[in-house]
Image (cartoon, rainbow, N blue to C red):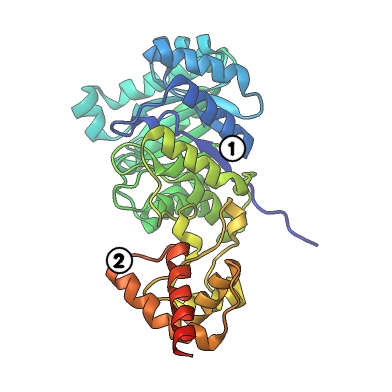
Amino acid sequence: MTTARKRIKIVDTTLRDGEQTAGVVFSNQEKIRLARMLEDIGVDQIEVGIPAMGGAEKESIRTIAQCCRRASIMAWNRAVLSDLKHSLDCGVDAVAISIATSDLHIKNKLGKTREWVLESIAAATEFAKKAGLYVSINAEDASRSDFDFLVQFAKTGLAAGADRFRFCDTIGLLNPQSTYERIQALHQALPDLPIEMHTHNDFGLATANALAGVTAGATYVGVTINGLGERAGNAPLEEVVMALHYLYNYETGVKTAKLKELSEYAAMASGRPLPVQKAIVGNNIFTHESGIHVDGALKDPRTYEAFAPEEVGLNRHIIIGKHSGTAAIINKLHTLGFNIDEKTARELLPRVREYAVDLKRSLTDPELIGLYEDLMQERKISA
């Protein structure tokens, strides 16, 4: 009997936190297209923006709420009733209500008190619930908040009707161990309130921390496409989903074969090109040049690939360059229509390597063919 895999829900905030990347602006058409793609790929909830901004922002959110019917559509709000009224105008079914919970933020940013924070989150949550909305209460700077106050904040929101608690590692200060410990303690203190991980990548640990939170009891993960977001960005959708599937044996409902297409569109719309070495969706993930690696990959792709390229919408590529071996040359020329034997490949290999060093890059197909034809011509002349 097969045991059902644990279901983790994915909350994508590319259209809100992702667009807060310095210098990034999505057009209304791009926001709508991204929302449709996220819904199509199977994301559970899409955080689409901040209605209180008004104007084009509010217009795009209203359109997305009308056209996306499967995924939950969430709007971001401060713990202010006027913000929530703007969200209601847009027709969303869910709201994130965000407020600072660390003393650093409460005192130095807001100039308020802990009591004011509790009163504000209770009032905003009650208002949203009376309007029939799903509510996530967001603890900004949760990772630097006093634990007892964080629990009190969550319990206050729960008593007011909150559906979920978002733990925000706002400036990415946690590590996987500290994340696990805090989320486990919160889960034990708040067994009836689902927890969402919202992690930032300032120390390059956003994905690791999000996953640590899941193993500690969180059942929602906030992500952005390609890791877009404030400063160093957020946990990338593609990394979190594939890690949950392959490393933790959890289910997300995401159609991973569409990840590459989604990432490429978000890269174009944001003006932030995908690095070739980007985890999961970068072109180099399934590109092989080193002779030993190519030989192994040709015999059995699993020797040097964690999963099949088709799983994320990519293809395998064998490139020819300084580090290539005879197996790669034979395979590449065969795919190009040339019947080359091992002896010829060994003779061609030094020329390939020298050419690649001179060019400081791998060879194009025409360049490789040119070297091969030069060699064949020299053989004819000397024969």
Disc number for residue 191 = none
Above or below, 253 relative to 32? below
Along the line of sight, the residue nearer the viewer: 170 or 258 = 258
Residue sitting nearer the eye, 377 or 38: 377
Q: Residue at x 52, y 24 (%)?
A: 32
Question: CB atoms at circles 1 and 2 under 8 Å apart?
Answer: no
Q: Is residue 329 visible?
A: yes
Dot label at residue 43: 1
Q: What residue lies at 25% left-to-right and 31% top-to-bottom?
A: 105
**At numbered mark 2, what does the secondary structure look like: helix, strand or loop?**
helix
Kindly report the distance in space between the C-alpha atoms of the residues bearing marks 1 and 2: 44 Å
On residue 359, which mark appears? Answer: 2
Residue at disc 1, secondary structure: loop
On screen, 195 above or below 326?
A: above
- In the image, 345 versus 82, the foreground residue is 345
Residue located at (24% from left, 23% from top): 110
Q: Nearer the viewer, mark 1 or mark 2?
A: 2
- Classify 331 as above or below 30: below
Could you tell me residue 107's position as x and y percent? 21, 28
Q: Is 142 or 303 nearer to us in this picture?
A: 303
The residue at the point 58 percent across, 63 percent down is 307
Q: Are there few (<14), some (14-19), or many (20+) residues within 10 Å of tag 1?
A: many
In percent of width and height, residue 71 lies at 62, 30
Residue 67's quadrant in the figure?
top right
Q: Earlier in the sequence, mark 1 or mark 2?
A: 1
Residue 349 appears at what percent x and percent y?
A: 42, 81
How busy is the neighbourhood of tag 2: few (under 14 within 10 Å), some, or many (20 plus)? few
Q: Is residue 159 visible?
A: no
Q: Position of residue 308 (x, y in %)?
A: 60, 62
Give the quadrant of the N terminus.
bottom right
